[in-house]
Image (spheres, rainbow, N blue to C red):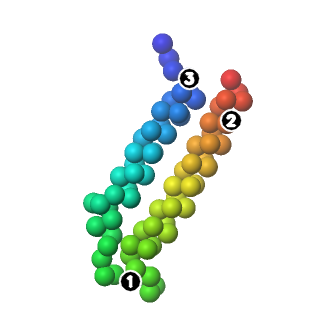
Amino acid sequence: MKKAPSSHLRESWVLFFTLGVVMINFPFIHIFNKDILIFGIPLLVLYFLAGWPLSILVVYIFARILDKTEKDE
């Protein structure tokens, strides 16, 4: 039996949640916690300042796509 597109999108939320949790845990934080400045801003701060809006953008895009597929059904 073929799954509906909306159920496939709902399952992808688990993947993105897991990816988000991994990205804010020790290995990645340790990678970006260096004494490097980019435009006078520490690398770790830039990592968080780029990662946070990116995760919000992913949530927004998926919410819009999920809303469209539910309206079509």
Disc number at residue 68?
A: 2
Q: CA distance from mark 2 to mark 3?
A: 13 Å
Q: Residues within 10 Å of mark 1 (few under 14, many from 20)?
A: few
| Outermost residue to the top | 1
Amino acid type, label 3: Ala
Secondary structure beneath label 1: strand
| Outermost residue to the right | 71
Circle 2/circle 3 CB separation < 8 Å: no
Which badge, 1 or 2, comes first in the chain's sequence? 1
Secondary structure beneath label 2: helix
Which badge, 2 or 3, comes first in the chain's sequence? 3
Q: CA distance from mark 1 to mark 2?
A: 42 Å
Disc number at residue 4?
A: 3
List x then y, in percent, for residue 21.
39, 51
Q: Where 6 falls versus 49 (above or below)? A: above
Give the side of residue 27 with respect to residue 65, left or right. left
Q: Where 69 falls versus 25 (above or below)? A: above
Q: Residue at x 45, y 38 (%)?
A: 14
List x then y, in percent, for residue 48.
45, 67
Amino acid type, label 2: Lys
List x then y, in percent, for residue 11.
48, 33
Q: Quadrant of residue 27?
A: bottom left
Q: Quadrant of residue 25?
A: bottom left
Q: Which residue is mark 1?
A: 37
Give the side of residue 36 with respect to residue 14, left or right. left
The number of numbered discs placed on residues in the rendered structure image is 3
Give the side of residue 51 with respect to residue 22, left or right. right
List x then y, in percent, for residue 31.
29, 67
Amino acid type, label 1: Leu
Disc number at residue 56?
A: none
Q: Residues within 10 Å of mark 3 (few under 14, many from 20)?
A: few
